[in-house]
Image (cartoon, grey):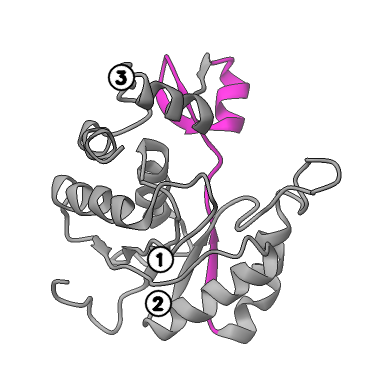
Amino acid sequence: AGEPPPDDVDVAPFQCRNPVHRAHYELFTRALDDALVGEDGVVLVHPTCGPTQADDIPGVVRYKTYEVLKEETKNDRTRWEYLPYSMHMAGPREAIQHMMIRKNFGCTHFIIGRDMAGSKSSVTGEDYYGAYDAQDFAKEKGPELGVMPVPSLNLVYTDEEGYVTADEAKEKGLSEKKLSGTKFRQMLRGGEDIPEWFAFKSVVKVLRENN
């Protein structure tokens, strides 16, 4: 697991339930630049490795992708640990539970994405929770929990400037590239080349070997 960070350093965990792709990596590394995180702060990449949704990649395979990426992107400001937990997709309340769990791991902050632990309505098929409900609830409860929520950036990939915020892409009129999770899985099964802006080659290799 390596040496724990010093006691006086901010620790901002990144929660995920899927393999880490380029956009995730950009999210958690850029979180360290947030004014809410101290200059010596570190990110704890802390994926849940228990069973999740039926169409998700199995926990054992996800673990293997994390291990290769941990070696590939090794640096002093990123730590990796694993959480034996199954996602419930319970929206804002589950986001708060994750903050409490991470506090027990010694974290001071919590990187929280849009619609964290969100799910679809069984009636309409639309997102059940609002895009910012989890972030707003975390901001409200953060002081009580003693954990500082760090809202994650809404990043998009552009031909011209790589990963930028969606607002910046719109403002500059940049050309966005998109690849859905469904399309990615189809390409993976079909043996097609996965663009490197979307996924790390090492991660794709592990997924193909274990498909």
Secondary structure of residue under mark 1: strand
Question: In this view of the protein, which residue sits in the foreground, 38 or 169?
Answer: 169
Cα distance in 3D space between marks 3 and 2 = 40 Å
Query: Going 37% across and 25% down the picture, which residue do you hit?
Result: 189
For this view, does 57 lie left or right of residue 94?
left
Amino acid bearing label 1: Pro
Say whether marks 2 and 1 touch (CB < 8 Å): yes
Q: 10 Å neighbourhood of mark 2: few (<14), some, or many (≥20)?
A: many
Q: Earlier in the sequence, mark 3 or mark 1?
A: 1
Amino acid bearing label 2: Cys
Q: Give how far across and how far down residue 119 sits, in percent.
A: 69, 52
For this view, does 27 lie left or right of residue 91?
left
> In the rendered image, is residue 147 in sight?
no
Which numbered disc, 3 or 2, marks the residue closer to the eye? Answer: 3
Query: Going 51% across and 22% down the picture, which residue do you hit?
Result: 178
Q: Please name the residue that numbered disc 1 is placed on.
A: 13
Quadrant position of the C terminus in the picture: top left
Cα distance in 3D space between marks 2 and 1 = 7 Å
Which numbered disc, 3 or 1, marks the residue closer to the eye? Answer: 3
Secondary structure of residue under mark 3: loop
Asked whether residue 210 is drawn in magenta, I would say: no
Q: Please name the residue that numbered disc 3 is placed on.
A: 191
For this view, does 63 lie left or right of residue 17?
left
Cα distance in 3D space between marks 3 and 1 = 33 Å
The circle drawn on residue 107 is 2
Q: Give how far across and how far down residue 202 sits, in percent.
A: 20, 36
Q: Earlier in the sequence, mark 3 or mark 2?
A: 2
Residue 188, picture quadrant: top left
